[in-house]
Amino acid sequence: MIFGILLTLIALNLAFLVDKDEDETEEKSKRSTYRSTPYGIKALYSLLEESRYPVQRLEHPFTDLPGLHNVGTLVMIDAEEEFNPAPAEFESLSKWIASGKLCVLVGRKISVPFDEHTYVATQLAGYGKEARVLQPTDLTRGVTKISLSDFASSVRVQSSTAIAHVGSDAGTVVADTKLGKGRIIILTDPYVIANNGISKADNLTLALNLLAERPEGDIAFDEYHHGYGISGRAGGATAGVMAYFSGTPVPWMMRQLGLIILLFVFSKGRRFARPLPLKRERRTTNLEFVSSMAVITRLARATDIAMQSIYTEFRRRLCQYAGLPPKSSSAALAEAASRRAKKNPARLKALMTRCEEVASGAPASDSEMLKLVAGVRELESSLKL
């Protein structure tokens, strides 16, 4: 039954599935390396991984960067508004970059004062669909033009070491500047490295050039500011796994399965019928009981009374065992009990008939009385009456 309910719930989830990815647009989307949607960055991350680049996902705030000695490059792509870095994080990030690290900053809306001499800001600009190389540099090696979206912005870098690499008359799309011993590279359109744009024009070449001249250490893609991280914003370490199921009915199926399991445990943990009587353990062995009854019978010469006492209780228990009412005939009772116990009904019927005769006053020798009582006790023991 539970399996049938589960299949029904799965069918309903699939029937009424609404793909949340349809709500994403070029302007409003989740730029995460976990996402395989047109606007995600999973294609670039997978390419770097398969090309043996030392890549990882950063699920820590920027204040933890100084303690992550294996990270040499940070790629930050369009942080979501609800997870925007705090001022303390940018302060820690600036010190981390100045120590000799590289930060690749990708986004259309950037406004970051890294220190009193370095300020990066973007503004909307009408580029059309393409931008060209402004001068030959390490970032433009092998690049002729790059493909842009309709929403690309231009960047203005307030720094004495700023260099423009790619752009047009409308402004700069790719620029960089030094910060202490480190370097900041700015790309103003995430479309260039997103799943739906990285294969266009020379976008892939530019994406790889951004990471070509980098310090030692891993390349860390910021996922903390997309909602994944140790703070519990998106489930901590399990966020990466659950991201694969985003927009599918799988999370709801898992919740419903958990509810079914709880209901199953609840139903098995309580009684829905009358309480069963406790099993009474015999305080004497069958041999002791039979010997005692034989002595009493011999002294009192009350064979019929002894048999009535023994047989009446035996018959009552046998009726319960066979599931028949107490007034059932001995033949029917013997047949039902033998069928359940897989025993010979003729033998049980013969024993019951003789016991009833003795209980009614028929004469019986001590040896026969002993044999009948022993037979009753043997049956009680084997049938666990």
Image (spheres, rainbow, N blue to C red):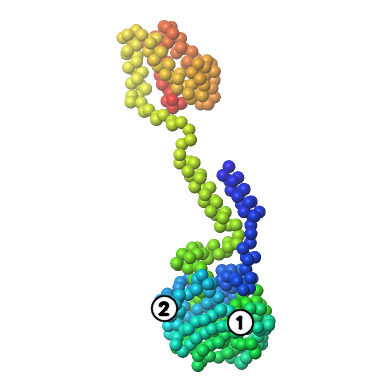
Q: Earlier in the sequence, mark 1 or mark 2?
A: 2
Which one is in front in this view, the residue at disc 1 or the one at disc 2? 1
Q: Check disc 2 and give the amino acid type.
A: Pro
**Residue 66's spot in the image, x, y percent?**
41, 78
Q: Quadrant of the C terminus?
A: top left
Q: In the displayed structure, does residue 178 sit left or right of residue 371?
A: right
**SS class, disc 2:** helix
Q: In the displayed structure, does residue 289 sit left or right of residue 162?
A: left
Q: Check disc 1 and give the amino acid type.
A: Leu
Location of residue 193 with respect to 346 vertically, above or below: below
Foreground residue among 217 and 237: 237
The numbered dot on residue 124 is 1
Which residue in the protein does label 2 denote?
66
Foreground residue among 236 and 153: 153
**Residue 326's spot in the image, x, y percent?**
48, 18
Q: In the displayed structure, does residue 230 sit left or right of residue 135?
A: left
The numbered dot on residue 206 is none
**Residue that lies at the very extreme toward the front in this rendered image:** 124
- Other-residue count near label 2 (Cα within 10 Å), few / some / many at <14 / 14–19 / ≥20: some
